[in-house]
Image: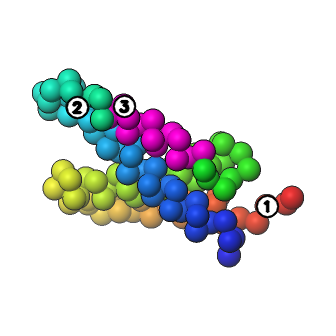
Amino acid sequence: MNLLAAPSLAIFLAAAFFEIAGCFAFWAWARLAKSAWWLLPGGLSLLIFAWLLTFSQSDAAGRAYAAYGGIYVMASLLWLWVVERQQPDRWDITGAVICIIGAAVILLAPRSV
């Protein structure tokens, strides 16, 4: 197992929370008629998300973002279930599993130095 994967996974999970929360704040303002004040914590949350990704153990930004994508999909479906109270269906779950497998391949693959 790639010893760098565990710290990256923790970073990706934290980043996913802040990205989804930030995007949801904009969604709430634009689609749910919430106050424009929602944009302030939303913007701050998105800044934290971007900052967190810089701590990924990847040697390249694009690879970090690609591996993060699978974690983001899984976290988005958890948000759907917990925050929006809509249960993911079998297609959501199937797609998330495919994405997690892809993220694991990217994150755990041996790299030539």
**In which quadrant of the rendered view does residue 61 lie?**
top right
Observer-nearest of 103 and 38: 38
Q: Which residue is mark 3?
A: 43
Amino acid carrying label 1: it is Arg
Mark 2 Cα-neighbour bin, 10 Å: few <14, some 14–19, many ≥20: some
Amino acid carrying label 2: it is Trp
Total residue callouts: 3
Are dots 3 and 1 in contact, CB under 8 Å? no
Q: Locate the C terminus by quadrant.
A: bottom right
Q: Is residue 20 above or below residue 95?
A: above
Q: Which residue is mark 2?
A: 38
Amino acid carrying label 3: it is Gly
Mark 1 Cα-neighbour bin, 10 Å: few <14, some 14–19, many ≥20: few
| Residue lying at the far bottom of the rendered structure | 1
Disc 2 or 3, which lies upstream in sequence?
2
Q: Secondary structure at mark 2?
A: helix
User: Looking at the image, which residue is at 28% across and 39% down?
Assistant: 24
- Residue 34 coordinates in the image, percent (x, y): 14, 30
Q: CA distance from mark 2 to mark 3?
A: 9 Å
- Residue 14 coordinates in the image, percent (x, y): 44, 55
Disc 3 or 1, which lies upstream in sequence?
3
User: Looking at the image, which residue is at 45% across and 58% down?
Assistant: 13
In the shown orientation, is residue 18 left or right of residue 69? left
